[in-house]
Image (cartoon, rainbow, N blue to C red):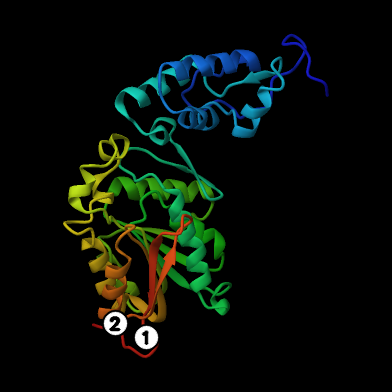
Amino acid sequence: MEHGSPTTTPPLAGAVSPAGCPGGDVLTAEELLQWRRALLLEGGRPADLDWLLDLGGGVSWPMLQSLWLHPGQVIQLLRSRHALEQLWRRHRRDAEPLQYLVGRCPWRDLELAVAPGVLIPRQETELLVDLALQLLPPELACAPLLWADLGTGSGCLALALARALPASRGLAADVSPAALAQAAANSQHTGVAERVQPLLSHWWEGLAPWCGQLQLVVANPPYIPTAEVDRLEPVVRDHEPRLALDGGVDGLAAIREIAAGAGSGLAPGGVLLLEHHHDQSDAVQALLGQLGLVEVSRHKDLEGVWRFASGRRPATSPCDP
């Protein structure tokens, strides 16, 4: 269909306005692009504003690019321009994460609800799911295996594993009630709640009933050294939960606890897979080996940085009491 004038061309199809929003404005492509330019003149990064237009306004990146070629096309926003302006200015003024302001975060093939008190899922963590699936023996991919996600946060890893391993059951553990509630809500929304059990637990403490039965354990624990947390950008330092960021003096406090419990928590031959800081690979490799894991390996992230470590419980070691 040819693009007509604003009076004859229907708006581009869009989702229903988010709950609590007064409804989106209808405007031409030219008006939207002029408005976008005006907001950028106030300051801020174009990529951040375009992210807000996508997740908060319903104008995807491909759609935004097409508007330059069709200035008469009509668009209906998910929110009013005023509402989006307010979110953008709060982000610029107070460094509030856009994910919290919009309440949503795309991650892998999921769209997760996020809120203050819950770590915002990072792109590099997406690879941890692929690595976990690669490390599992092929015969377990369709088997009723039991896995756990320690420090689940928003539940991103747990939900991705549940979807990729439909015959499995999982434990989504976190010490934060706020994070656990968010993970449970995301699990319900994603349709895997019957196979993912939320568990209030500090690392292994609440998993005693499953001692020696877990065939896969993943974790993205806090691993930033305490001194470095205070030097993070305000958008992270001042708003995301320090509990999910601060890994102690050397950044390895949580990783030590997780590794120490692997020998009894994992099933014989079970896999532990961790994310860690960009400069911790050697230390984490040594730690996993010292605590009795075998086949200890390192894995790169999407930028070629050694970001993940894995190991197996020996197939013949007994479960500790």
Residue at 38 percent of width and 44 percent of height: 120
Residue at 23 percent of width and 42 percent of height: 231
**Does the residue at mark 2 contact the one at mark 1 (Cβ under 8 Å)?**
yes
User: Given the image, on which type of amino acid does mark 1 rest?
Assistant: Pro
In the figure, is residue 171 to the left or right of 282? right
Is 56 placed above or below 281 here? above
| Residue 80 visible here | no
Is 37 placed above or below 205 here? above
Residue at 39 percent of width and 64 percent of height: 308
| Cα separation between marks 2 and 1 | 8 Å
In the figure, is residue 313 to the left or right of 138? left
* Residue lying farthest to the bottom in this orientation: 316
* Residue lying farthest to the right in this orientation: 1
User: Given the image, on which type of amino acid does mark 2 rest?
Assistant: Gly
What kind of element bears circle 2?
loop
In the figure, is residue 245 to the left or right of 90? left
Q: Which mark is residue 292?
A: 2
Q: Which mark is residue 168?
A: none
In the figure, is residue 209 to the left or right of 164? left
Residue 33 in the image, given as x and y percentages of width and height: 58, 18
Q: Quadrant of the C terminus?
A: bottom left
State the residue position of label 1.
314
Is 150 placed above or below 52 here? below
Residue at 78 percent of width and 14 percent of height: 4
What kind of element bears circle 1?
loop
Q: Quadrant of residue 299?
A: bottom left
Q: Quadrant of the N terminus?
A: top right
